[in-house]
């Protein structure tokens, strides 16, 4: 069986580049993982709270109200 080595190195097919050593998986400590998880959870919870909370709108100048509404055909008549 033929060896898959060229000059003592593994020969890679043309469509597969050799692995980059700088992209090797890094180890992360457990507290760091919990900190990132907590930050993501906090952002999600605050977003959900902001979306679901009903905010009352404050009107700067509320419209003036009158005691009676004029009739569609003219002025309001006393008593009726």
Image (cartoon, grey):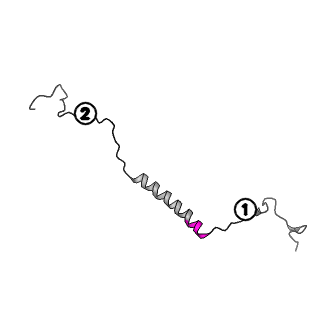
Number of numbered tags placed on the structure image: 2
Of pointers 1 and 2, the one earlier in the residue sequence: 1
Q: What distance separates the C-alpha of mark 1 from that of mark 2? A: 68 Å
Is 3 located above or below residue 40 in the figure? below
- Choose between 63 and 79: the one closer to the eye: 63
Q: Which residue does the image show at 46% across and 58% down from the upper left?
A: 45
Q: Which residue is mark 1?
A: 23
Is 53 placed left or right of 25 in the picture? left
Is 37 located above or below residue 64 in the figure? below
Density class for disc 1 (Cα within 10 Å; few <14, some 14-19, many ≥20) is few
- For label 1, the SS is helix
Density class for disc 2 (Cα within 10 Å; few <14, some 14-19, many ≥20) is few
Q: Nearer the viewer, mark 1 or mark 2?
A: 2
Residue 71 shown in magenta: no
Residue 28 shown in magenta: yes
Is 22 placed left or right of 41 in the picture? right
> Image quadrant for the C terminus?
top left
Residue extending farthest left: 79
- For label 2, the SS is loop
Question: For residue 10, which numbered disc appears in the image?
Answer: none
Question: For residue 64, which numbered disc appears in the image?
Answer: 2
Which stretch appears magenta? 25-34
Q: Which residue does the image show at 62% across and 69% down from the upper left?
A: 29
Q: Which residue does the image show at 16% across and 26% down from the upper left?
A: 75
Rendering coords of residue 41 (x, y %): 50, 61
- Choose between 6 and 49: the one closer to the eye: 49
């Amino acid at each position: 069986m033929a060896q898959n080595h060229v000059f003592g190195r593994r020969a890679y097919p043309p469509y597969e580049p050799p692995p980059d050593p700088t992209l090797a998986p890094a180890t992360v400590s457990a507290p760091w993982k919990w900190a990132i998880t907590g930050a993501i959870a906090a952002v999600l919870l605050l977003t959900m709270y902001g979306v679901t909370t009903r905010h009352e709108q404050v009107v700067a100048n509320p419209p003036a109200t009158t005691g009676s509404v004029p009739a569609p055909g003219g002025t309001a008549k006393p008593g009726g």
